[in-house]
Image (cartoon, helix red, strand yellow):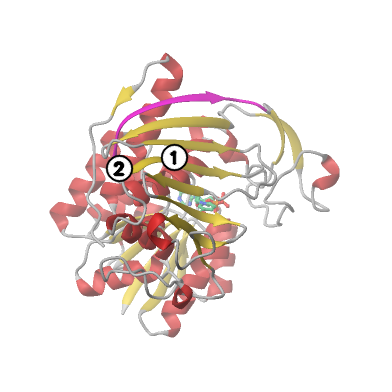
Amino acid sequence: MIRLCVVGCGSFTTEAYMPMIEQERRAGRVELVSVCDVLEQQARATMERFAAKRYETDYRQAVAQPDIDAVIIGTNIATHAPIALAALQAGKHVLVQKPIATSLEEANTLLAEAKRRRLVLEVEPPHVRNPLCRMARELIADGAIGQVCWVRAVSAHGGPHYRRWFWFRDQGGSVVYDMGVHAINWVLGLAGPARRVTALFTTTVPERLVVTDPAFRGTIPGISSLSRPEDAPPGAPVAPTRIDIEDNAMLLLELRNGALASVTTNYCTLAHELPSYEVYGTEGTIYIGGPQGALQYFSKRAAPFGKGGWVTVSHQGGLTANPLRFGGRGATGPLAMPSTVTHLVDCILQGKRPVNDGEVARHALEIMLKAAQAAATGQAQDLVTTFTLRD
Ligand SMILES: NC(=O)c1ccc[n+]([C@@H]2O[C@H](COP(=O)([O-])OP(=O)(O)OC[C@H]3O[C@@H](n4cnc5c(N)ncnc54)[C@H](O)[C@@H]3O)[C@@H](O)[C@H]2O)c1
């Protein structure tokens, strides 16, 4: 039984972590011991709603308690590293939201601390172990699309207008940290580490209508896009706000395998139906997340089976619809992905390293930090970190 402390009782914790924890609790694998938030009312309400044993308002005290085995961190971006470090130093396993930190030094310290103390350090997002990402990796490894030449990844929506801190740099706000990190992790999961990055960042819509109350709990329609006062839910306290972050960024990566990748990320996209992730090789193409299905691929080798060489793997059809087996290692298995909380518990109980571990997260962070440098200086930047995926 893993005894949990959750730090940060905001939107993601309430809507995503708590259902994940509830699933593990029903399976008898975790106990929700404490919840912690600087806003006392949030902490108390979360304790009551999700039947935690107690609430706290000081994370240092919360993570240090002897009846805690693991800490889940769902706070504002600027606080991830200090809270994760306090938890590791108190001997607790950690699952932390993305990005792992806001400097490479902090990320290095977290990795060293976890390694030294033999603690699990799992970092969101978990895309490298997404079944579709794994399936694409298997197809690539089996030669289905030949040599990988280029990758395109998009992660964009209208903006998190429900919360003010996302729009201010000193609180960790950055569309690249918040959204670009998803596309970057997909690129890393599909095609491996990068060795060079360049980028352009801009602020395209500098004035936004943003909710002013940090405890606001309503939802804003249309993936939180809010451009007119009448879009705000009744009673939501919104104010025109001059933001100080980039809201629109494009990154170019040279990968270690010789391919190029582009990452498009912004808070300026209300709708798109393009595949979110695309991989192009000398023998074929893989799409993930388009309107046609969960994963679609074209392979010269698939031509006799698929429609004109295209094979679609849909969420409904499951993987049994996939007629292809390359080298006996065809993609099989369920499309559902164990949650990050399930993965945390599995890793603790089995003494395993998470697939979405600190190394992947540190490399993604270096890409984001060096992309910002490249955008500021106009100079492409070399990357020094790397990672190995442990599937
Ligand atoms: N993986 C995803 O798809 C996804 C989606 C949304 C948000 N997120 C991430 O989740 C995290 C939280 O986002 P959110 O939308 O829930 O924000 P939020 O503002 O709703 O929640 C953050 C909570 O953390 C609390 N907090 C801040 N500093 C604290 C501290 N030092 N100690 C204790 N509590 C503290 C705040 O009071 C707030 O209640 C962010 O890192 C965000 O990037 C991830």
Q: Quadrant of the N terminus?
A: bottom left
- Determine whether the residue tagged by mark 1 lies in a helix, strand or loop: helix
Q: Position of residue 360 (x, y in %)?
A: 30, 48
- Does residue 136 lie above or below 181 as drawn? below
Q: Amino acid at mark 2?
A: Arg
Q: Amino acid at mark 1?
A: Ala
Look at 34% across and 68% down and name the residue there: 343
Say which residue label 2 marks. 362
Which of the 4 image quarters holds residue 71?
A: bottom left
Look at 45% across and 74% down and name the residue there: 319
Look at 77% across and 38% down and name the residue there: 227
N-terminal-most mark, 1 or 2: 1
Q: Position of residue 205 (x, y in %)?
A: 68, 28
State which region is magenta: 193-204
Any atom of ligand 1 within 8 Å of the CB at mark 1?
A: no
- Determine whether the residue tagged by mark 2 lies in a helix, strand or loop: helix
Q: Residues within 10 Å of mark 2 (few under 14, many from 20)?
A: many
Q: Position of residue 156 (x, y in %)?
A: 58, 43
- Does residue 389 lie above or below 322 as drawn? above
- Does residue 362 lie above or below 25 as drawn? above
Which of the 4 image quarters holds residue 53?
A: bottom left
Magenta region includes residue 8: no
Magenta region includes residue 198: yes
Task: State whether the magenta stretch is mostly helix, strand or loop.
Answer: strand
In the rendered structure, find residue 78 and report the number of the disc placed on it: 1
